[in-house]
Amino acid sequence: MMTIFTKEFNDFLNSLIGYVAISVFLTGVGLIMWLFPDTNVLDYGYATLEPVFTVGPYLLLFLVAAITMKSFAEEKRSGTLELLYTLPFHTLDILLGKYLAALSLVMVALVPTLLYYVSIYQLGNPTGNLDASGILGSYLGVLLLSSVFIAIGMFCSALTENQIVSFVLSAFLSFLIYQGFEAIATIDVWGSWSYYLEQLGIMFHYENISRGVLDAKDFAYFIGTSFLFLLMTLLTLESKR
């Protein structure tokens, strides 16, 4: 597994796609934070990173889709997946190695955003007047959100040999699971069931953690959803092996 992890992570860092995806993500977060009129912190009147963690997930799903689109699609197209199968690797080792490499790359992409925290910390009145627990919870929520998006992206990549199809399918499915249930729950036909329907979506659990509310059921949701998509990816790969 560690061999696959090292290879995948190095391939990301040596590829143009990895740097372009991270650059676009950081540029988008910067524009949201400092420039766009409805979200920039200078118009908020108080020091907060809330705009980043509210709009950021939509940028994140595109970042993850770009990172994961080649995970298996390119391997299948080029024939290198069959070569991996001839080596002493279990399919699970290949899957987890690629999964951890993608998650590590997302963490690398998030590190520069800590500069925004430092900036907001200095802009506070008085200096340091921030909801530190809320920000910490938001970062934790982003990591958990990334884990689900990556699992979805790898599942989509395992379904096709075309990277573009994988990217579009991953972005669409991630968006659907992130906000789709929230939107459906607002339709005035569900009655008391709308609350339970809302909990099927990622947004409900992400917002809880982003507020600094650490509930076991939210962690269980993210872990369970990631596990489900990783399991479907494993079964898809095994069926084609």
Image (tube, rainbow, N blue to C red):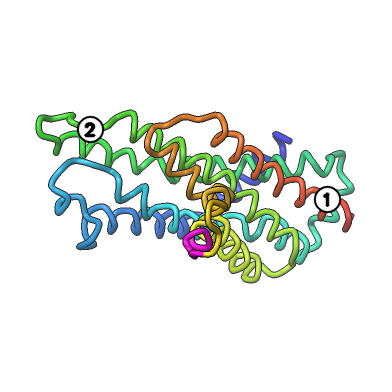
Q: Nearer the viewer, residue 234 or 76?
A: 234
Residue 185 part of the magenta-drawn span: yes
User: Is 54 situated above or below 210?
Assistant: below
Q: Nearer the viewer, residue 160 or 199?
A: 199
Q: Quadrant of residue 99?
A: top right
Identify whether 126 is placed above or below 227.
Answer: above
* Residues rendered magenta in the picture: 183-188
The Cα–Cα distance between marks 1 and 2, rounded to whole angstroms, is 45 Å
| Quadrant (top left, top right, bottom left, bottom right) of the C terminus | bottom right
The three-letter code of the residue at mark 1 reads Leu
Q: Return the residue found at the far front.
A: 191
Left or right, 108 with reference to 153:
left
Residue 114 location, x and y as percent?
Answer: 33, 38
At a point 35% along the width and 59% down the height, the residue shown is 28
Query: Does the image show residue 14?
Result: no
For disc 2, the neighbor class at 10 Å (few under 14, some 14 to 19, many from 20) is many
Q: On the rendered image, what quadrant is the N terminus found in?
A: top right
Label located before the other in sequence (1 or 2): 2
Return the mark for residue 235: 1
Task: Judge whether 192 appears above or below 131 on screen.
Answer: below
Give the residue at mark 2: 130
